[in-house]
Amino acid sequence: MSGLKYTPENITTLDKDDIFVFGSNLAGNHCGGAARVALERFGAIPGQGVGIQGRAYAIPTMFGSVAEIRPYVDDFLDLAYEWDENTFYVTRIGCGIAGFTDEQIAPLFDRALDMYNVRLPESFVKVILAERSKASRSR
């Protein structure tokens, strides 16, 4: 796992094949946090709360439980696997306005840690690696 690359904390520009991944609400009201950045800089579409839009990808987090967010993360990871010529920069989705913690959301992205084209926040990576380590010790 050496040589891991992380999502920068403050993204203001992207290279041509990069995609900004942000937490949204189902209504697509991109008013604050990373959603606002996606709207102002990367082509997020008002009224679209899920999926690819411009050079951004919305994962809804402003509702329900972590279990309800999981299918949206899985859909994103499936797309990222297929779109392997793009690099996806995942922000700390769900950990700002939505009120979840890194420990709640990061495990949803475990599969992404093994994908060369998905960058995760360093805080997510630390949680995932700690969980993997704990799981291997309990075997």
Image (cartoon, rainbow, N blue to C red):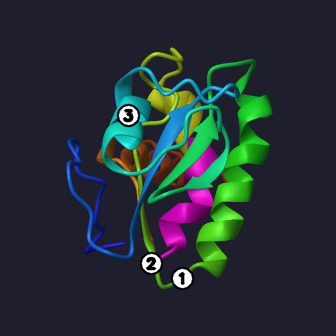
Which of the two discs, 3 and 1, sits closer to the camera? 3
Q: Nearer the viewer, residue 138 or 60?
A: 60
Q: Is residue 21 visible?
A: yes
Location of the N terminus by quadrant is: bottom left
Q: Which element is circle 2 on?
A: loop
Secondary structure, magenta segment, majority class:
helix
**Residue 137 shows up from this direction:** no
In the picture, residue 75 is in which quadrant? bottom right
| Mark 3 and mark 1: Cα distance apart in space | 23 Å
Q: Position of residue 125 (x, y in %)?
A: 40, 51
Judge whether 79 appears above or below 63 on screen: below
- Residue name at image x 44 percent, y 78 percent: 116
Q: Is residue 33 above or below residue 125?
A: above
Residue 111 is inside the magenta segment: yes
Which element carries disc 3, helix, strand or loop? helix
Q: What residue type is disc 2 on?
A: Tyr
* Residue position for label 3: 34
Q: Is residue 84 above or below residue 132?
A: below
Callouts 3 and 1 close, C-beta under 8 Å: no
The residue tagged 2 is 116
CB-based contact (under 8 Å), mark 2 and mark 1: yes
Name the amino acid type tagged 3: Ala
Callout 2 environment at 10 Å: few (<14), some (14 to 19), or many (20+)? some
The residue range painted magenta reads 107-117
Q: What residue is pinned by disc 1?
A: 84
Viewer-side label of 2, 1: 1
**Does the stretch in magenta take in 32?**
no
Q: Amino acid at mark 1?
A: Asp
